Image (tube, rainbow, N blue to C red):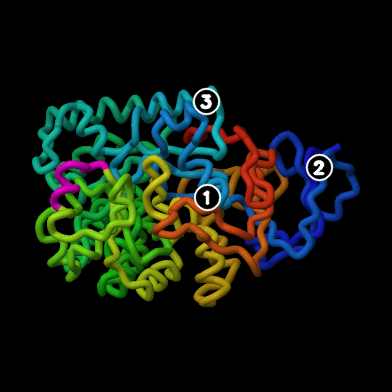
Amino acid sequence: MYDIKIINGKIVDFDNNTFNKVDIGIKDGKIVEIGNITEDAINTIDAKGKIVSPGFIDIHMHEELIDSMENDNYDIANKMCLMGVTTAHGGNCGINIGDTKEFIGFINKNGAPINYVMSIGYNTLREKIGVLDNYREANDLEIEKVCKLIKEYEDLGVVGLSFGIEYSPGITFEEMLKVCNCIKGSKLFLSAHFRSDCEKAIESVKEMIDLSRKTNLPMQISHLGSCSATGMMNESIDLIQKSIDDGLDITVDCYPYDAFSTYIGSAIFDEGCFERWEKDYDSILLTEGKYKGVRCDKETFYYVRENYPDMLAVAFVMNEEEVIECIKAPFVFVGSDGLFNKSQGHPRGAGTFPRLLGRFVREKEELTLIEALKKITILPSKRLGLENKGSLKVNMDADIVIFDENNIIDKATFENPTLTPVGIDYVIVNGKIAVKDNTLINSREGKYISRS
Ligand SMILES: [Zn+2]
């Protein structure tokens, strides 16, 4: 007797780039049979006409504060799950939100709606050992202290080390080389939020490529859209392709929106940003409290930056054609960069994957369904070292999304950033139903996965 049997669906097969009409049998969290299944099951799902895909793997998101988890809100993980994500990679852009040891401990004890893998954020570590000035370089003694901390996190099984160069402009290339030196020979990969955008995008991309070249470590370039989708995408893509042809292990992620979002008090909004973007103050949308939905003028911008530095703001400064060009490149995965602060922020945290499949695959026909699915399943699973996730085969973890390719679409907007997408019938996490008919079932089957 199986726990779940999925019948009549179109099962994604990446080996042959096709969809097969076969059944899937699930028991004890694993896929145990694929084919014409005669065995009975406790729960039979008729997926007639629907796509049965590996659960989506979000290569780039920002984990939530443990407070919301303790209150059982799971501010971000719930929204992730509702858009088909079964495993997410946190700790990006150099930032860990809250204490990572406590975060991992909490999930180990209580579970979560989705599985988590984690990177350790260099900017957070730098702050932790006392470098509170984001505009200065860390000295050798400080780097030594950071390296000690990194060792502790390595023991917790984190998969990568992330840099948020733009957030701490004082971080020099030399400093990053020194830090990477202390993870030499480990299995960690690097990821980086670039140094700057627009006319500085190319030198920023070069810096991340050089870091990989000089350290011999794999590199995941973060959200390239927000770096280069302002006239610099062509050249950025060519540069990265060339470095891959040279033998470097470089991959990229991008979210499918033409606006970015971050904290209004951060260095991203330092003097000169509007000149670089060639935009005015009204390109910035505020997201919280009495400022929710407010477009900035000069006075509001400086006032909020000073008084509410932790408020998330959205900046409409990118070109969608260039975002699409980015997503279509073979080495680019789609990740959400999802981040919510009290359920406010950018709609990418609740809409990224249905938007990719609805807007860019079905409506705009920019890429095929199989191509798009690879970018959110098997490709990120390889980068993250998730051997049991990312494709549907016997003995793999039963992380599965069942959706309607003719109907799936995001609903989250900049005004209502957490609205649930439509077209997702089931999300199964480790063999248990977590979402049914776009509605969350209180599942806590998600685990923290340490590097194998
Ligand atoms: Zn970032």
Residue pictured at 63% horizontal, 61% vertical: 14
Q: Estimate the spatial distance between the alpha carbons at disc 2 and disc 3, rounded to whole Å.
A: 27 Å
Q: Mark 2 points at which residue?
A: 43
Disc 3 secondary structure class: helix
Query: In the rendered image, which quarter contains the N terminus?
Result: top right
Question: Which residue appears farthest toward the front when viewing the image?
Answer: 290
What residue does disc 1 label? 57
Amino acid type, mark 2: Asn
**Residue under the image location 43 percent in, 53 percent down:** 417
Quarter of image, res 293: bottom left
Q: Where is residue 245 in the image (x, y as percent from the top left)?
A: 36, 66
Q: Which callout, 1 or 3, points at the residue further toward the start of the chain?
A: 1
Q: In the figure, is residue 370 to the left or right of 436?
A: left
Question: In the depicted view, which residue is nearer to us: 13 or 281?
Answer: 281
Q: Name which residue type carries label 3.
A: Asn
Q: Mark 3 or mark 2, which is nearer the start of the sequence? A: 2
At label 1, the amino acid type is: Ile
- Asked whether residue 276 is in view, the answer is yes
Q: Under tag 2, what secondary structure?
A: strand
Residue on which the image places disc 3: 108
Q: Where is residue 187 in the image (x, y as percent from the top left)?
A: 40, 39
Q: Main secondary structure of the magenta part?
A: helix
Mark 2 vs mark 3: give the one in front. 2
- Label 1, label 3: how far apart the Cα atoms are: 19 Å
Q: Please give the range of residues in magenta.
A: 302-310
Q: Does the residue labelled 3 lie within 8 Å of ligand 1?
A: no
Mark nearer the N terminus (2 vs 1): 2
